[in-house]
């Protein structure tokens, strides 16, 4: 049973970013499923590290995309990514210190983070990119 499943409310209409969001979701679900199946220790720690790597890469790609389309609020968006990565690192350290056993708060953080960030924050640059694509060229 996955922690979250993909649905249309997560679709921001930007193909490459949707695909990367799905990769993040898959990485989250892999940790959750392994934890539910009773796995602890190194395998969980390396799955959390993988989620961190996939997320870091996505944030970099997303920030490059926002720069490419000239999205004005990208510095603020970048700061939000920075804060998410710091919070993630804190949860990661706690899970490692607990012997590769993430807390319910960690999963709650992941679930909320992915859905709230995509639906409230990422959607804004996606809407901007659609409007920019429709604007007449001067
Ligand atoms: Fe973002
Ligand atoms: Fe994103």
Image: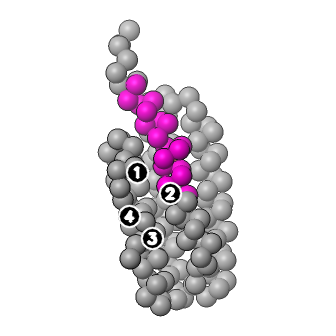
Q: Residue 10 carries which label?
A: 1
Q: Which residue is drawn at 59% across and 65% down?
A: 109
Horizontal side of 77 relative to 5 (left or right) equals right
Q: Can residue 30 be seen in this view?
A: yes
Spatial separation of the CA atoms under disc 4 and disc 3: 7 Å
Count all numbered tags in the image, as a single digit: 4
| Mark 4 neighbour class, 10 Å CA radius: few under 14, some 14 to 19, many 20 or more | few
In magenta stretch: residue 121: yes
- Looking at marks 2 and 4 on the same chain, the residue that comes earlier in the sequence is marked by 4
Q: Residue at x 52, y 73 (%)?
A: 48
Q: Mark 2 points at which residue?
A: 114
Q: Residue at x 53, y 80 (%)?
A: 45
Spatial separation of the CA atoms under disc 2 and disc 4: 11 Å
Q: Mark 4 points at which residue?
A: 5
Q: Which residue is drawn at 43% across and 61% down?
A: 24
Mark 1 touches mark 3? (CB < 8 Å): no
| Mark 2 neighbour class, 10 Å CA radius: few under 14, some 14 to 19, many 20 or more | some
Spatial separation of the CA atoms under disc 4 and disc 1: 10 Å
Looking at the picture, how far across and down is residue 84, in whole percent?
A: 61, 56
Q: Where does the magenta region start and end?
A: 113-131
Q: Name the residue under label 3.
A: 3
Q: Is mark 2 within 8 Å of ligand 2?
A: no
- Looking at marks 1 and 2 on the same chain, the residue that comes earlier in the sequence is marked by 1
Mark 4 touches mark 3? (CB < 8 Å): no
């Amino acid at each position: 049973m996955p922690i979250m499943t993909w649905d249309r409310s997560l679709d921001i209409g930007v193909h490459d970013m949707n695909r990367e969001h799905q990769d993040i979701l898959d990485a989250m679900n892999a940790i959750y499923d392994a934890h539910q199946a009773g796995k602890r220790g190194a395998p969980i720690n390396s799955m959390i590290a993988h989620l961190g790597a996939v997320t870091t890469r996505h944030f970099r790609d997303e920030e490059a995309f926002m720069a490419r389309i000239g999205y004005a609020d990208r510095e603020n968006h970048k700061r939000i990514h920075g804060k998410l990565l710091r919070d993630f690192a804190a949860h990661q350290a706690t899970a490692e210190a607990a012997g590769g056993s993430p807390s319910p708060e960690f999963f709650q953080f992941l679930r909320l983070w992915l859905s709230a960030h995509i639906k409230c924050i990422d959607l804004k640059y996606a809407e901007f990119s659609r409007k920019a694509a429709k604007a007449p060229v001067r």
